[in-house]
Image (tube, grey):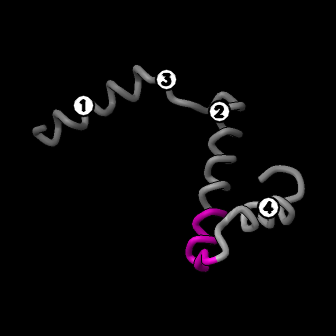
């Protein structure tokens, strides 16, 4: 939620259905915060290359016998 966080949060809440629960609202705000954080980290070059992730997952699967 860049810029004015309060206004961004209100827009997210306004986009939810009228019968959204408090849990729905909290999750929507949390989800948006996590997406924004991931995009910011990506913009800063703080990512893991795909081939490195594949290698790590393969090693993990082998270590668990899968």
Q: Earlier in the sequence, mark 1 or mark 2?
A: 2
Residue linked to disc 2: 42
Q: Residues within 10 Å of mark 3 (few under 14, many from 20)?
A: few
Q: Which residues are magenta?
A: 19-29
Q: CA distance from mark 3 to mark 1?
A: 16 Å
Residue 23 location, quadrant: bottom right
Quadrant containing the C terminus is top left
How many circles with numbers are drawn on the protein?
Answer: 4
Q: Earlier in the sequence, mark 2 or mark 4?
A: 4
x, y (%) of residue 44?
Answer: 71, 31
Q: CA distance from mark 3 to mark 4?
A: 34 Å
Q: Main secondary structure of the magenta part?
A: helix
Residue at x 77%, y 64% (from the top left corner): 9
Residue linked to disc 3: 49
Q: Residues within 10 Å of mark 4 (few under 14, many from 20)?
A: few
Dot in front, 1 or 4: 4
x, y (%) of residue 1?
Answer: 77, 53
Residue at x 82%, y 50% (from the top left corner): 2
Residue linked to disc 4: 11
Q: Residues within 10 Å of mark 1 (few under 14, many from 20)?
A: few
Residue closer to the observer: 6 or 52: 6
Residue linked to disc 1: 59
């Amino acid at each position: 939620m860049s810029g004015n966080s309060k206004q961004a949060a209100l827009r997210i809440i306004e986009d939810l259905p009228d019968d959204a629960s408090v849990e729905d609202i909290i999750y929507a705000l949390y989800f948006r915060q996590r997406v924004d954080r991931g995009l910011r980290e990506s913009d800063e070059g703080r990512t893991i290359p795909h081939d490195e992730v594949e290698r790590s997952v393969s090693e993990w699967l082998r270590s668990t016998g899968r």
